[in-house]
Amino acid sequence: MDLKEHIRSIQDYPKKGILFRDITTLIKNEKAFCECVDQIVERSKKFQFNKLAAIESRGFVFASAVSYLLKKPFILLRKKNKLPAETHSVEFELEYGTATMEMHKDAIDKNDNVLLIDDLIATGGTAEAAAKLIEMSGGNVAGYVFVINLFDLDGCDKLIKKGYKVENLIEFPGH
């Protein structure tokens, strides 16, 4: 199955000049969604990890299913002030502004190997912030699996140059 056929592109969202790759059309199709999750599970076999983490909110859709299938703990990386217990916090740049990501301080134990899952990588700022949260907790980033790589925005290349392992299922230009 070609997962690209199930991704909708929306011009000028969330602001003018952005071509948004919408995964809602993929997840509303049960066959496409199952195929996507199966492909993430298959790609995850390339990594040694004991926990999964995902970035709010679309990453949660995929990581929760993968967590269930692999019987691995799942860690939420959330926007500022969305988690109730004590958190680690990282501010980072997006292609269209800044944001803060948080994770519970007790989510990761020292030397945990964590696989990060997200729906999309663009410039890599969010993915780098996720790695910082994992590492400030004493964990290791086992690698990343993205559903979509916007290849011309260089996010995957940036992560690879920093020594991280990266897998993605499909690629689109970012513009």
Image: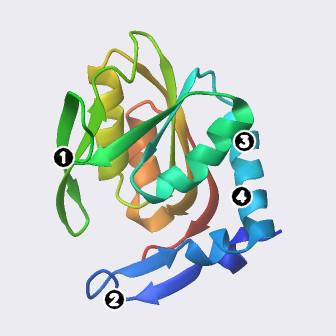
Dot 3 or dot 1: first in sequence order is 3
- Distance, label 3 to label 2, CA atoms, is 32 Å
Specify the amino acid type for callout 4. Cys
Q: At x 44% / y 67%, what residue is drawn?
A: 152
Which numbered disc, 4 or 2, marks the residue closer to the eye?
4
Position in image of residue 50 (x %, y %): 58, 20
Residue, disc 1: 81
Q: Nearer the viewer, residue 57 or 161?
A: 57
Going from N to C along the chain, the mark reached first, 3 or 2, is 2
Q: Is residue 151 left or right of residue 133?
A: right
Of marks 3 and 4, which one's residue comes earlier in the chain? 4
State the residue in front, 136 or 60. 60
Q: Disc 2 versus disc 1: distance between alpha carbons?
A: 28 Å
User: Mark 2 is on which residue type?
Assistant: Asp
**Element type where label 1 sits in the image:** loop
- The local crowd at label 2, few if under 14, some if 14 to 19, many if 20 or more residues have their Cα within 10 Å, is few
Could you say whether the residue bearing mark 4 is in a helix, strand or loop?
Answer: helix
Q: Callout 3, which amino acid? A: Val
Residue at 36% in and 52% down: 124
Q: Is residue 29 visible?
A: yes
Q: Quadrant of residue 159?
A: top left
Q: Which residue is mark 2?
A: 12
**Furthest residue toward front:** 84
Q: Residues within 10 Å of mark 1 (few under 14, many from 20)?
A: few
Badge nearest the viewer, 3 or 2: 3
Q: Earlier in the sequence, mark 4 or mark 2?
A: 2
**What residue is shown with label 4?**
36
Inter-mark Cα distance, 1 to 4: 31 Å
Residue shown at 64% from the left, 68% from the top:
27
* Mark count: 4
